[in-house]
Amino acid sequence: MTVFRLETADHNTTAQAEPVRVLHIITRMIVGGAQENTLLSVAGLHAMPEYDVTLVSGIDKGREGELLSQAREACHLIVLPEMGRSIDPLSDVVAFWKLFRLMRKGRYHIVHTHSSKAGVLGRLAAKLAGTPIIVHTLHSLVFHDYQPWLVNRAWWLVKKICAPVTDFYISVSQIIVDKAIAARIAEPERFRTIYSGMELDWFLNASFDKAAVRREFGIPQNAPVVGKIARLFPLKGHDQLMDAAPEIVARVPDVRFFLIGDGILLERLHERARQYGILDNFVFAGLIDRTRIPEMISAMDVVVHTSLREGLARVLPQSLAMGKPCVSFDIDGAPEVVIDGHTGFIVKPFDSVALADRVAVLLENKDLREQFGQNGRRHVDPNFRSEKMVADISEVYQELLKKKAKKISAFNLRNNKQGYP
């Protein structure tokens, strides 16, 4: 693999041992899909001799849990307290200035941003700092159907403003690419879909005591279990699952809804279940360490994904890798992994009647569950392996490095003249 560095005044480039300096930037490292994607990306790239990777993250002390400790072990980590998720003009200006100073000092060849706030601040700072290559990952689109029109248009305008300073976009699903192109964010040749990778063998080879998990959470051994893994947060679709729950209970009275995650909706969901008279059918597990997620999935019979906005939820390929069929709303990249009638069922968002029926059909038909599960295992491997994701990202980097060779040579020459080591 080629690393470009200027060696002579005539702008020739040659392969060198010095790695490409890469800076990844994300708003926060909570327990979440975009963050796990970023963690595995920086860890995989940093382990390669071709790259020297630094991750910059803000701080979020919410109820979702954090991944900063794992990130600290995976690569160089810089925590930027001023880079919060909410818009704060003073803090945002400070964060922008610190990012700019960091980029000038670190002489990064590639700046790769994730999430909305970090994507804006990071890309603009990288442009100002003269970074040769700027990449942005679309984990989802920040403008969507479930926000006021004015907010939607404002975020669309921000994306348009950032597009000219972005050399390349990586998307976690093809539908996100299609939507971005339709929204005229950038030209098709500047996009590539790279599915969000994960430690797939962790799920494919998972072997746990299903009975022990059920005992731990008070789930009857013979009860059919519908699982959902997501933060208890708006747009994650817990209310939509609750809308369908009474009908599912009517058809499968001993069903248990096994909800993994914590968040601000816990009390409301608990109260809704109580009002429906089905509280005994719900198991709120709370925040579970990510290392135990395969163990939790092992206790489920059907996995539901009712989020209203998500690029491509990691829980879907994870569950299919463990042979668990999925029922998902038809949003973003879900149909790319949940193949309707083959690895699970796809239903329209907010269609509680169809959601209840598809879940009940799977709960009532063990053979169908096993068939979908087997199909799912074949579908996700190797498409969702972290190794493939990292290799694909590296391929994008190398193509950009070759394309920008002269710019990188000039960048290195300028830094060398300024006395940087």
Image (cartoon, rainbow, N blue to C red):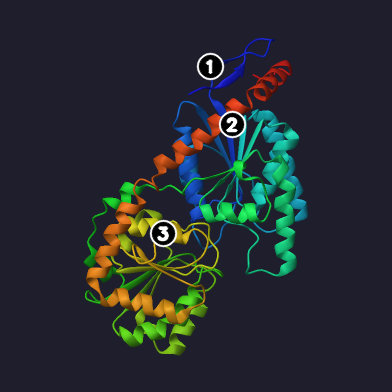
Quick one: SS at disc 1? Answer: loop
Q: Residue at x 49, y 65 (%)?
A: 231
Image-based side of 20 in relation to 214, left or right: right
Image location (x, y in percent) of residue 218: 29, 75
Image location (x, y in percent) of residue 262: 47, 67
Q: Residue at x 37, y 75 (%)?
A: 358
Compared to residue 371, the image places residue 66 above or below, namely above
Q: Which sits earlier in the primary sequence, circle 2 or circle 3?
A: 3
Q: Separation of disc 2 and disc 3 at Cα?
A: 31 Å
Q: Residue at x 49, y 26 (%)?
A: 50
Decide if residue 230 is in sight here. Answer: yes
How many residues crowd around disc 3 within 10 Å: few (fewer than 14), some, or many (20 or more)? Answer: many
In what quadrant of the picture does the C terminus appear?
top right
Image-based side of 230 in relation to 409, left or right: left
Tag 2: residue type? Leu
Q: Residue at x 32, y 49 (%)?
A: 202
Compared to residue 412, the image places residue 319 above or below, namely below
Compared to residue 315, the image places residue 5 above or below, namely above
How many residues crowd around disc 2 within 10 Å: few (fewer than 14), some, or many (20 or more)? Answer: some
Q: Separation of disc 3 and disc 1 at Cα?
A: 40 Å
Quadrant of residue 295 within the rendered picture: bottom left
Quadrant of residue 165 within the rendered picture: top right
Nearer the camera: disc 2 or disc 3: 2
Q: Separation of disc 1 and disc 2 at Cα?
A: 17 Å
Quick one: SS at disc 2? Answer: helix
In the picture of the structure, the residue carrying the numbered disc 1 is 16
In the picture of the structure, the residue carrying the numbered disc 2 is 400
Quadrant of residue 390 within the rendered picture: top left
Q: Which sits earlier in the primary sequence, circle 1 or circle 2?
A: 1
Quick one: SS at disc 3? Answer: helix
Residue 315: numbered disc: 3
Residue 24: numbered disc: none
